[in-house]
Image (cartoon, grey):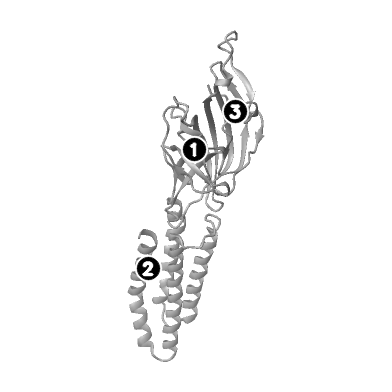
Amino acid sequence: MCLFLFLFFQISPIITHAYQLKPTGVIENNDTADKPKQIDVGIYVINIEEVNSAKQSYKATLALDMKWNDPTLICASSEDKDKIRKFNLEEIWNPSMVILNEQRVFKQYQYKVWVDCLGNVEYGLILYGDFETIANIKEFPFDQRPLKIEIVSTEYETSELQFVNNKTITGRDEHFSVTDWNIAEIPVAESATYYFKPQNHELSAFVYQLTAKRNYTFFVWKIIIPLIMIVVMSWAVFWIPPSQLGPQIGLSVTSMLTLIAYRFAIGHVVPNVGYLTRFDKFVFGSTLLVFLALIEAIISGSLSFSKNDKLAKAIDWYSRFIFPVIFIAILIYSLFI
């Protein structure tokens, strides 16, 4: 029985010094005392509104359900066996969990638990807000990133407590409102180990993950293809007579400034990273080629003014074939290799 009531919003603490969570084996049962206490976890993603690459975060609404058994809460024989009791979370034993990668998250009804007479405890809440998602974007705009929910117990190690995936609850809604990313249909949910370095502890953890692939068609049709047209436009200088140096330089400079403006226009889409993405390589190669076309125009124009018009026209003629070949090589290398 899942009880998600929209009453108030809270923000929980976050552990610092996070290290990568390592998957561990799932314990199917807990029928002996020497096994870790089992906590069933179910995460259902209701909606993903946005994936923000520049801020390395995503905005989502999800339901979290946790179940465990506490023998100390079994009803006395004289009590009604069907009654459900409600407690504040801090009044009973709980796994002391936090969501490791939350940023600004609102939690609805996060401090209430429901207990039946067999000692079965259920803790449910709905979360809405921003969660951290860090990924390498070298493949941009053909990149993908993990959308994770990372749960960590702040008190219990893997030998004491084990989070186990509740497959009957874990999942995702069929449709999300995010449009510029394609979200994987099947989530991955598994127990994990979180290494807390300051105290040298391996805490029990749980990871839910969806993989998001960027919808690159937007960048292809609205950015990459227009940039290709701008580069091709800059080659018009090879058909302008070498004596017309002014129009040649004006066309080359305009093409270069347009390329630079396009680069700044998508600055809000990706974070400031210390490496080149596929798109960076493409824009840099295109800008370099437009710059070389400008240099070629200056050289051919200078030769024409020096009464060497035959050589100037020969350079223009060869450039009509050399530049397209170089550009095709740049295009293939930057976007496909």
Q: Nearer the viewer, residue 62 or 200?
A: 200
Rendering quarter of residue 25: top left
User: Which residue is at the far bottom?
Assistant: 307
Q: Residue at x 34, y 74 (%)?
A: 322
Q: Amino acid at mark 1?
A: Thr
Mark yes or no: residue 280 visible. Answer: yes
**Residue linked to disc 3:** 93
User: Disc 3 or 1, which lies upstream in sequence?
Assistant: 3
User: What x and y, as percent, mark residue 237?
Assistant: 42, 75
Q: Residue at x 33, y 78 (%)?
A: 318
Please rate how many residues cluster around mark 1, counting C-alpha atoms within 10 Å: few if below 14, some from 14 to 19, many from 20.
many
Which element carries disc 3, helix, strand or loop? loop
Residue 87 appears left or right of 19: right
> Which residue bears the numbered disc 1?
158
Badge 3 density bin: few <14, some 14–19, many ≥20, Cα 10 Å:
few
Up-down: is 317 above or below 218?
A: below
Please state which amino acid type lies under the numbered disc 2.
Phe
Farthest residue toward the front?
A: 34
Q: Which of the pair 196/12 is nearer the observer?
A: 196
Amino acid marked by disc 3: Trp
Give the image location of residue 86, x and y in percent: 62, 21
Residue 337, quarter of picture: bottom left
Place of residue 105 in the rendered image (x, y in percent of width and height, measured from the top left): 61, 40
The residue lying at 39 percent from left, 60 percent from top is: 335
Residue where numbered disc 2 is placed:
327
Task: Using a 10 Å C-alpha cutoff, classify the residue at mark 2 as few (fewer than 14 neighbours), some (14 to 19) or many (20 or more).
Answer: some
What label does residue 319 carry, if any? none
Q: Mark 1 or mark 2: which is in front?
A: 1
Mark 3 near mark 2, Cβ–Cβ under 8 Å?
no
Residue found 46% across the figure and 58% down from its top: 223
